[in-house]
Image (cartoon, rainbow, N blue to C red):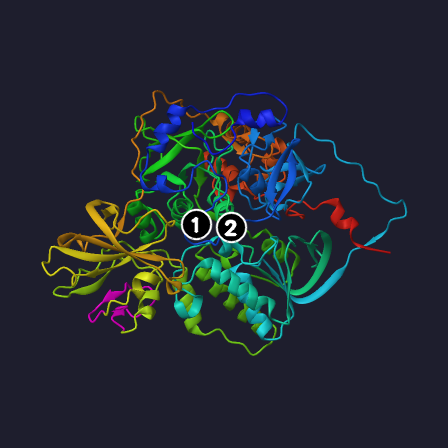
Amino acid sequence: MSLNVLSFHDTIAIMGDIGEKSGSSGERESHDKSNSLLNLQSPMQKNRITKHPILDIKAEEPEIEFKFNGRPMKARKNEMISSALFANGVHVFGSHHVDGAPQGIFCANGQCAQCLLMVDGVPLKSCIVPIKAGMDVRSIVGLPSLKADDLPEDLTLKTPTIETDVLVVGGGPAGLTAALELGANGIDCIVCDDKQALGGKLSLQTHNFFGSVKECYAGTRGMDIGTMLDGQTRGQKDVKVWTDSPVVGVFADQLVGVVKQGVYTLVKPKAMLVTAGAREKMLAFPGSDLPGVYGAGAFQTLVNRDLVKPSDRLFIVGGGNVGLIAAYHALQAGIDVVGLVEALPQCGGYKVHRDKILRLGVPVYTSHTVLRAEGKGHVERIITCQVDEKFNPVKGTEEEFEVDTLLVAVGLAPVNELFESAKRVGLKVYSAGDAQEIAEASAAMFSGKIAARTILKDMGKDADIPEEWVKMLGMLRSKPGPVVGSYPPPNGLKIYPILRCEQEIPCNPCVDACPVATIKIPEGNLLGRPKFESGCIGCMKCVAVCPGLAITLVDRRIDPTGKTARVMVPWEMADGMVKVGQDVTTTGAEGEVLGTGKVVRVVSGTWLNKRKLLSLEVPAEAADMVAGLRMREPGEKKVPSAVKPVEDSEIVVCRCERVTRDMILDYIRATGTKDFNAVKAGLRCGMGPCNGKTCGEMIMRAFRDLGITVKEVEPGTMRPFTQEVPISAFLKGERQ
């Protein structure tokens, strides 16, 4: 197995034992032949991303030294410990004290505890702790002994309390737009975010946004929107920004606990706005707890924020926008995407997102799921299968794929526990963004503005919420419409765009970009499908701005014989993968191979905002159908020699306490309980460091599988603190 990681045996060797490395030259050779254009990238064994079509990569960055299990390693200053380990090829961080199971990362967002390590003698989540020079990082073996406190006997503490009009929990798109609206109206507010920088998931989004150009920056890359909102928020005199400051609890006296840059602080707000975003849902199957299985958001964090290449060959489960976009981001980083499965008959994400990875050569298998992940201490292969209309596996349809990473992208759940806590204690509380309703970031930005106006009204300020805003938010939150096909190409024109918008989604950048207004939305609203009428001048601006890469420009003026035509297609892959004069495989809208085209021109410039346009010379009769080009060839499918039946005893539901699905089912049957807290007390599931954030939905699913409806189940109680608070946070308080 050709892994871009240290095997589990390698990690054990670092921990002090001796083990064999996995992988043979024959296996590596077979993998290297699995695609064509990808092999033009830099060597696959590099763990740092050194070439990227969108992200700026500095030629050299100063490195610092640290130790992992006594072994010297190098890192980039202030990157997260987990990212530094991945950059050094370490994906297995240690073993669980209950059963010795290998541990790695899962969420890379501080929500779970898979990446727990001893850092200078203190157990910490390595995905949210910046690396520092000289750090001694060690795997946790068993239950560790902690350092004794060295405190003066007469120490007394006074926790600081700060008053504010509004406390905004979360510095992502919803929180920042709300803070801007509040600050502009003279409202004193504090924005708290648990990360070192503002922007939330915007910082991970390298693609152009959908939505409205005027209302939510459609056509602009998410990371650029995040940078812009960050600067605007910090420029508001009435807005205070607290980064590295997680909000950890709301109490009966309506005070809110915040660990402000390591110091426990109480905030007394008149109102609280929760814009904490969402966390990824978990999918439980045999091997789902192996290192190498983790969330798509964690992958985007490693790749797009930390410029770490965590994989050579990955597979994705989940065909929503998150999974489809993660596949595209992986290809941009030079990672081979072997395939994607979706249990539903069709992908739930935007069709334009699905089509752009199909065109590049990534197979998408609908009505399929992952049956199991296998490997010795780390993912080495997965088994997929078809599912029937009730989502049950269809025996005899199993297929095997050799991969080193499996991304789970099966949906998001609102981070709303602080909102619920505030409601219980009577604090005036509001929510916006994904914490209120899961949708795209464009909707989150708009909902933040509306939430801020609502707060202003409730405070007696002269503020209104225009009816157009409410209508716009509804459109931005809408699900994609049914696929109805594209408008037919125009007849008799020599130059014209082909718009492949086959379903209603909120998007209008092409309409705003056209300087001669030849592209319009017939339905007259943001959800209408854009249509070309006539009069194209060939400026290419619509091709340059389309968030879905769904527009090409056909030019039939070049060849007087009429045998060939030029097609301008958008391109966002690494430099050097295609060159002028190169023959490439052209593909249609949904990835079907059309034939061969020749690259005759590569257009670049600052006006394209990192995108390039490729001019392809193709047969004239194929010009209207050419939508892109293939960069990888799908590998051969492999039928496994034998598939082990799935047993509930193999499926780990609670990662923190290593509680399996059969243990939960047996406990519910034996006790007859319909109380989440009873299962929690009896088995300790939900009592680990993640506080039930990862396993909660899986436990509820166990109730449902036994015929107990959600309404019948007494929900679990979540008390402060919502995440770990070190004792040192209290000891750094104001001393008397």
Residue type of the residue flagged with mark 2: Ala
Q: Foreground: 44 or 168?
A: 44
Q: Nearer the viewer, mark 1 or mark 2?
A: 2
Residue designated by label 2 = 59
Mark 1 or mark 2: which comes first in sequence? 1
Q: Nearer the viewer, residue 139 or 438?
A: 139
Q: At which x and y percent is residue 122? A: 71, 38
Q: Is residue 102 above or below residue 416?
A: above
Identify which residue, 223 or 274, lies in the foreground: 223
**Above or below: residue 184 compared with residue 632:** below
In magenta segment, residue 250:
no
By secondary structure, the bulk of the magenta-drawn segment is best described as: loop
Where, by quadrant of the figure, is residue 647 drawn? Answer: top left
**Amino acid type shown at disc 1:** His
Residue 213: image location, x then y, percent: 39, 68
Residue 334 falls left or right of residue 660: left
- Residue 452 position in % (x across, y down): 55, 68
What span is colored magenta in the figure? 517-536
Q: Is the residue marked by circle 2 packed among few (<14), some (14-19), or many (20+) residues within 10 Å?
A: few
Few, some or many C-alpha atoms within 10 Å of disc 1 (few <14, some 14-19, many ≥20)?
some
Q: What secondary structure is marked by label 1?
A: loop
- Asked which quadrant contains residue 42, the reply is top left
Q: Is residue 547 left or right of residue 407?
A: left
Residue furthest toward the bottom? 462
Residue 151 appearing in the image = yes
- Which residue is found at the position 69% from the left and 29% from the top? 143
Kindly identify which residue carries mark 1.
52
Looking at the rendered structure, the secondary structure element under dot 2 is loop
